[in-house]
Amino acid sequence: MIEIKELHKSYKMGANSLHVLKGLNFSIKEGELVAIMGSSGSGKSTLLNILGMLDEADTGDYTLDGVPIKNLNETKAAKYRNKFLGFIFQSFNLINYKSAMENVALPLYYQKVPRKQREEKALKYLTQVGLKEWAEHLPNELSGGQKQRVAIARAMAAEPKVLLADEPTGALDSKTSYEVMDLIQNINDQGNTILVVTHEEDIAQMCKRIVHLKDGVIVEDKKVEQVRAAQYVQ
Amino acid sequence: MFSRDNWKEIFETIQKNKLRTFLSGFTVALGILIFVVLFGFGNGLINTFDDFFSDDATNVFMVFTGRTTMPYKGYKANRTIEFDNSDIQDIEKNFPLFLEYISPRIIRQDTVAYKNESNSYSTWAVGPSHQFSQMTIMMKGRYLNVMDIENKTKNAVIGRLVEQDLFGAKNSIGKYIDVGGSSYKVIGVFQDDGGDREERNIFIPYTTQQLIEKNTDKVDAMVIGFKPSIGYAGAMAFEKSLDKFIREKKYINPQDQNGIFIRNVADQLKQNQQFARVLQIIVAFVAFGTIIAGIIGISNIMVFVVKERTKELGIRKALGATPKTVISTILLESVFITTISGFVGMLIGIAILGSMGEKLEDFFITNPYIDLPMAIFATIVLIIFGAIAGYVPARRAANIKPIVALRDE
């Protein structure tokens, strides 16, 4: 699903440049649940931004579902993002004047799906994350965990190839974190490919594979015995 | 770009951001409103100036006498200058090229009575040609004619309101009224656009008035009509040579400011019109200033709106909005708000002008109005500049990377 070869990225900081990613190689197959771990400054967010086409690599190849992601202009990147990727952010990034359902339906709006179908689909995914009753509520009427679940429903709504989660539990307490992870595991069980960036060991252990980044290189890439989050959730 | 879905998205955004919508709409509406009202007042000002002069002919000089303040050719200062009938004839003889008509004018205040009704009116002792200088319009009967002057008849032409005051609804023609102790026959009734005051005047033959005043040949003032064909420059030249002629005849120092006075209506009209034009230019300048202020206002709001929405736009881009969609959404929203509120402001402004009418006449503003094309033009200018003002920040917002926009807190 995802193929990365010799990926380099550096940022210019005034006179000197900061080499953040130093030639990364790895691939992710369909249906995997991968945690990318590393301390701050290890380059994990940069990697995620490149994978999410929110940022561009300096050199190296990136292939997503057989499509080479290269020399994209803004319009093309937007279309690929819409088609291939679903985003889950640490700070949820819901649009605060739109209801939960409208937020979930937004990626479909950009896919030019008719309004009625949009609403049906949005409701379907909200039901899947257990928030059917909250469809008409605004984000500020929801708890942090609920907001993140709306964000997950939104990421799912466009039926992307890959879900990218950037510290999805970073703003949540541990109980809510496990609820969110349980949801992510369930989605993964349905066959979706998910990438989770985190620095929390217990969250990483709930994935099926952990890629450890340090100073811009992969220091460890191992399969793990998945810890089910459901056991922490009543 | 104009699909129903798009509009729905825009309406929702507008509805859910009421303060923002109100602020930008209010700025635009207010700008257009002030523009329309100011511009209309400018036109009202011009109307007033036009009205001042439209009831009288403009190809007219009034010549008045005064007291000299300088000695000249053996005559002492402080001498009263008087005109008499010979002056009229001399001017007629000397300026045939310029002159269209000339009439003496002697104004007296008299008590005028008919049966039990009486009142005080101005009686104007004049010649037949005086009718042209005031553009007096006859409602019934006739004006004074040459025979009245020659025969020194006791005929009177009365104003519409004089007839109304003294005769009520009855016809006054052929009736006799008492003017300052003498009996006059009413031969005509006139109206005048100059207003109530002028319609309370009475015209009688100047020769009759002179006869009553101990058979004098003195004349208070002269009303001189010049040929319109001589133009403005010709009128100025005529005024100059007329002034010279009278000063020579009456032995008045050429430098003396007070011996005689010539009031040149055409010159005054021109000056006043110029004054009104300058005023209108100033008003228009201020009005366009408000439009520019409105444009700056809407630009500021747009910059603020885009800034405020940076994060939202980042989210939208992450979810698949292309730069084009982002720009068109912001632009359509801003054009929609400016168009609606611009035309609302315009209509309110026009309604305000319409309701003014004559209410501001005391402030020299009569029937203020604005041509519809002008108002629409100004509104469209504001809409276009509002769109440009929205486009610049919208493009910037559409081009920043979503990752940067998302980080914006």
Image: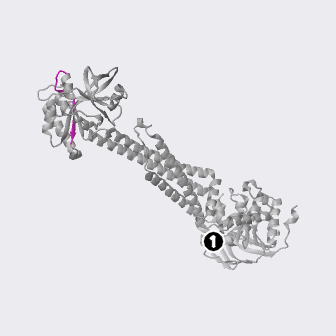
Is A55 or B264 nearer to us in this picture? Answer: B264
Percent position of residue B127, x then y: 21, 32
The residue wearing badge 1 is A77
Q: Assign a secondary structure to mark 1.
A: helix
Q: Please identify the quadrant where the N terminus of chain B is shown.
A: bottom right
Q: From what the image shows, is residue A208 above or below residue B23?
A: below
**Location of residue A222 in the rendering, given as x and y in whole percent from the top left corner:** 80, 75
Q: In the picture provided, is A76 more to the left or to the right than B60?
A: right
Give the answer, above or below, for where B60 lies relative to B285. Answer: above
**Residue at left 85%, top 69%?**
A227
Is residue A180 shown left or right of residue A8? right
Q: Residues within 10 Å of mark 1 (few under 14, many from 20)?
A: many
The correct choice, above or below, for B162 with respect to B264 in the image is above
Where residue A114 appears, x then y in whole percent?
A: 67, 67
Q: What range is drawn magenta here?
A: B213-226
> Can residue A71 be seen from the camera position used here?
yes
The reply to whether residue A42 is visible in this rendering is no
From the top left corner, tell me how far across and down residue B21 is, in percent. Answer: 59, 52
> Numbered disc 1: what chain?
A
Residue B228 shown in magenta = no
Foreground of the two, A60 or A10? A60
Identify which residue is drawn at 18% across, 42% down: B98
Identity, as a three-letter code, of the amino acid under mark 1: Ala
Question: Which quadrant of the rendered structure holds the C terminus of chain B?
Answer: bottom right
| A6 and B15: which is toward the camera | B15
Q: Residue furthest left?
A: B74
Q: Which quadrant of the figure has residue B92?
A: top left
